Image (spheres, rainbow, N blue to C red):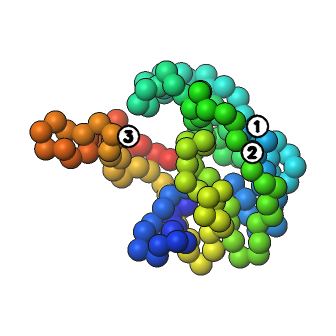
Amino acid sequence: MIVFIFPLDNSKDYIKRVVGLPGDTIELKEGLLFVNETPVTQTAAQDLTLLNDLPDGDKFNLFTEKTGEAEHYTQYFKYEDPQNYGPRTVPPGKLFVMGDNRNRSYDSRGWGFVPLSNVKGRALFVWLSLDTENRVPLIGLPRIRWERFGKMIH
């Protein structure tokens, strides 16, 4: 997970997972990620209690995905068609990033590659998580997701 300057608006920082390095070929086939024609290992999550942390958890499929040594969670909306993308080769000096909410993430599939010069660093933990869909009654401010506060990022 990296923090980077959003390529389409230099005033914004984004956090996404790097799935492709320069020279890698990225493809999605029926929702499954392939890097250099090799499928990324994806298995149904064993700890389904994590779905309790997600709004409308019964509408998600939760998986663990292994890229290299790292293992992390990804989620997919159950009732949306699997996506296809690519293949696209990551150019020199660029990265391909994706969100872990795979079929609803605004990421390199939508706006392109991240220049290496835009990378600010590695994301280590969640500092603040806001629920903008379930706001505080009467005042309309987003609720703070306290259960995510300080949580380490895989």
- 3 and 1 marks in contact (CB < 8 Å): no
User: Pointer 1: residues within 10 angstroms few (<14), some, or many (20+)?
Assistant: few
Identify residue type, mark 2.
Answer: Asn
Q: Residue at label 2?
A: 84
Q: Secondary structure at mark 3?
A: helix
Q: Is residue 62 visible?
A: no
Rendering coords of residue 7 (x, y %): 55, 72
Callout 2: helix, strand or loop? loop
Q: Are marks 2 and 1 in contact (CB under 8 Å)?
A: yes
Percent coordinates x, y for residue 154 in the rendering: 56, 46
Question: What residue is shown with label 3?
Answer: 148
- Foreground pick, 122 / 89: 89
Task: Specify whether 46 is left or right of 130.
Answer: right
> In this figure, which residue is indicated by the disc labeled 1?
30
The CA span between labels 3 and 2 is 31 Å
Q: Quadrant of the N terminus?
A: bottom right
User: Which residue is most to the right?
Assistant: 37
Q: Is residue 38 visible?
A: yes
Q: Which of pointers 3 and 2 lies earlier in the amino acid sequence?
A: 2
Q: Toward which corner of the image does residue 79 lie, by quadrant?
A: top right
Whichever of callouts 3 and 1 sits on the residue coming sooner in the sequence is 1
